[in-house]
Amino acid sequence: MSDFTTPFWGYFVGIVAMVGIVWCLWLLYTQRRWLGRAPANQPADTGHVWDGDLTELNNPVPRWWTVMYLLMCVFAVGYLVVFPGLGHYAGTLGYTSADDVRKQQAAQETATRPLYARYEAMPVPEIARDTRALEIGQRLFLNNCAQCHGSDAKGAPGFPNLTDGDWLYGGSPETILQTITKGRHGVMPAWQGVIDARTASDIADYVRSLSGLGVDRSRIFNGKDAYGTYCVACHGVDAKGNQALGAPNLTDDVWLYGSSQRTIEATILNGRDSRMPAQEGILTPAQIRILTAWVWRQSNWNAPEGGTAATGSAGGPGDARPGGAAAAPGATSAAEPHPGPAAASSGAGDAARTLASARP
């Protein structure tokens, strides 16, 4: 409680804690004084009678009960002096639960360091050929990434598929490592207020036509003209996107939010704001390297020398992919903040899926 970021809650908690103790002492004192005025061995009649002969009496509180409550009040005061309980006051021991968590994390990191040490300087493609590393990477993914990307890493609407080799920011090991470490924030600007619904529909028809989808061909010309005015700066003249910006390829029939006419129109008019949370501070650098190797491996099963994936137990699709091999001891860590529509792969970054809300 000493970690509150605003003064109000610190004072509020401190006042409530002290008022509770004072009120308890006052109640005990006033009741003992009142009971002391009653004649000995003659409990007061409350006047409540049930069934004609069942009378409720006001018997004195047993002395042991009063002493117990007094001791509890003394303990409470002592606790508030030693431990944080009075708002911003940290206590004489300076204890905080956050510090306790940091110590536990440090102890866990120390215990698992030997497990990760061999991978710290190993190139990512080489890690991706290591059976044990794939087992560890799978568990790291399931604990930290599957919430958004699914246990099979194939994503969901708004969350990219990490197995199809389609990437917003690029699919090299270095780029995936950067994405997982630092996260991504992709923004597709909303064009509502700049263009009308008719123009958005024309653009959607044009964009859909680039992937060979069924469209109203009479509207493609107007859509192409509007695309050249509003969309070409990010997605390029050929609509193949720009990985430097995280702008998606609009010609490959890969879509993050869906390929329907209505969905693309909504993306154009309302925009998209997608975030891939940074994992530094949650996972260690060695864990991030192993997770990078596992994610890279999902779309590089037949990579050439230097990135060739092993087959077999944890090396083949049946094992290294989520749901496969068993975990290596001590192979996980904190849960990952839900990776937003951008994650190490198909959308290593972000679901900005601009214009066509097309996937990374």
Image: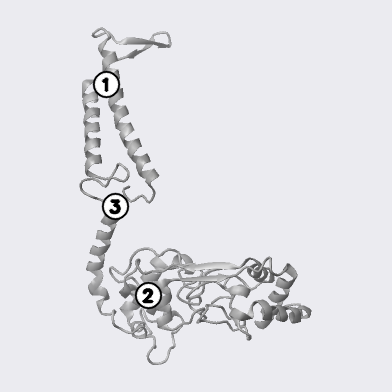
- Helix, strand or loop at label 1? It is helix
Q: CA distance from mark 2 to mark 1?
A: 63 Å
- Indicate the quadrant where residue 295 lies: bottom left
Q: Position of residue 80 (x, y in %)?
A: 25, 40
Reading the image, the residue beneath label 1 is 29
- The foreground one among 207 and 190 is 190
Q: Horizontal and vertical percent for residue 68? A: 22, 28
The residue to which callout 3 is attached is 97
Q: Quadrant of residue 38?
A: top left
Compute the Cα span from label 1 to label 3: 36 Å
Instruction: Classify 156 as above or below 30.
Output: below
Image position of 130 with respect to 33: above or below: below
Front of the two marks 2 and 1: 1
Q: Nearer the viewer, residue 322 or 244?
A: 244
Q: Tag 3: Cα neighbours inside 10 Å, few (<14), some, or many (≥20)?
A: few
> Distance between the Cα atoms at labels 2 and 3?
29 Å
The x, y position of residue 89, in whole percent, is 28, 45
Ranked by sequence position, the earlier of labels 2 and 1 is 1
Mark 2 or 3: in front is 3
Q: Nearer the viewer, residue 230 or 215?
A: 230
- The answer to whether 358 appears left or right of 64 in the picture is right
**In the image: residue 15, left or right of residue 146:** left
Q: x, y percentage for residue 298?
A: 44, 79
Element on which disc 2 rests? helix
Q: Do callouts 2 and 3 mark residues in contact (Cβ within 8 Å)?
A: no
Q: How is the image coloured?
A: one colour
* CB-based contact (under 8 Å), mark 2 and mark 1: no
Left or right relative to 154: residue 25: left
